[in-house]
Amino acid sequence: MRARRLVAVASVAVGLVALAGCRTEPGVAAYVGDVRITETAVDAIVQELATASPAPQAPGEPPAERPEFRRPQIVSTLVLHEVCQRVSADKGYRAQTPPEPEQVRQALGLAPGSVFAQRQAELNSCLSGLPVGSPVAPTQEEMTDLVEAGKTAGVIPAEVTVEQAAGQLDGDQLRRALAAKKSLGDAVGDYDVTVNPRYRPLEFPVLSFNSDAPAVSVLLGEEGTGAVTDVSTPDPLPSVEPTDGEQVEPQPGTVDG
């Protein structure tokens, strides 16, 4: 059996742990501390991606297909963008690579000036400065979950046992992904992240089998099934609204979506 090689999605990922209490109000996709990530900010990026033209192709090549991005993917990018900025500021972490929005834009097949490409590039740069702990060996439960995810994604044959798959999957790449998930999840445990029930569970992939099949993910905010629940509405908080795509230093109570 040859399981497909795991593909790293990012150098590290930020793990978020929701604190006690539940917050929600109409028009808010997620909270990070006292900052709201609004549905308006998400809508603006959804509209951009829906109307954007694919990146130009070389002469003679067929037109590129328009990239598809799910709404939760946009929300997780905006949440992580804010969290990473806060973690870096509080801990004194410095990005190891500069933002490269043009490179991200071309890799994702987005149109010039894409706000989403800018936000993703800023996030990638910020994540490059976050430390990763020592490699962590997967538990039996983690390996079982990983193999089941691979079978669901169709990249591991159904007849392959966990023991057979572990021999090929358990390596430095997987152990570093588990280390990033653990150490960074612990590091940002004090950040108050709350996600709108419609997006739960909201996860960020640290390692993937392919673009549509996460292998190791970090939970952002609370667990849940996406069902809407009745909760109290808090007082209004600072909003997150889209900008023209320029990189902006984060200010207390605001974030650029």
Image (cartoon, helix red, strand yellow):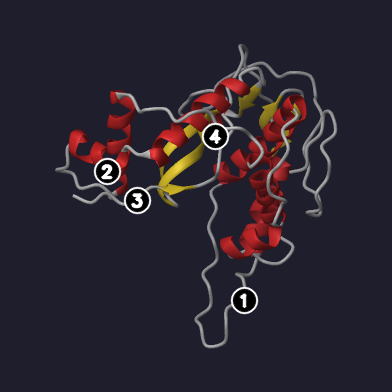
Could you give the CA–CA distance between mark 4 and mark 2, rounded to whole angstroms?
Answer: 33 Å
- Mark 1 vs mark 4: in front: 1
Disc ID at residue 168: 2
Q: Amino acid at mark 4?
A: Tyr
Question: What amino acid does circle 3 point to?
Answer: Arg
Give the residue displayed 50% in from the left and 81% down from the top: 62
The answer to whether the residue labelled 2 contacts the one labelled 1, judged by CB atoms less than 8 Å apart, is no
- The label nearer to you, 3 versus 1, is 3
> Circle 1 sits on which residue?
56
On screen, residue 237 above or below 44: above
Q: Which mark is residue 151?
A: none
State yes or no: discs 2 and 3 in contact (Cβ < 8 Å). Answer: no
Which of the two residues, 3 or 222, is positioned nearer the viewer here? 3
The residues tagged by marks 1 and 4 sit, at their Cα atoms, a distance apart of 33 Å
Are the residues tagged 4 and 3 within 8 Å (C-beta)? no
Q: Are marks 4 and 2 in contact (CB under 8 Å)?
A: no
Q: Which mark is residue 199?
A: 4
Tell me residue 33's x, y (percent).
72, 23
Give how far across and how far down residue 239 sits, in percent.
79, 34
The image quadrant that residue 128 belongs to is top right
Residue at image position (25%, 37%) is 166
Mark 4 or 2, nearer chain start: 2
SS at mark 4? helix
Image x and y of residue 190, in percent: 65, 17
Secondary structure under tag 1 reads loop
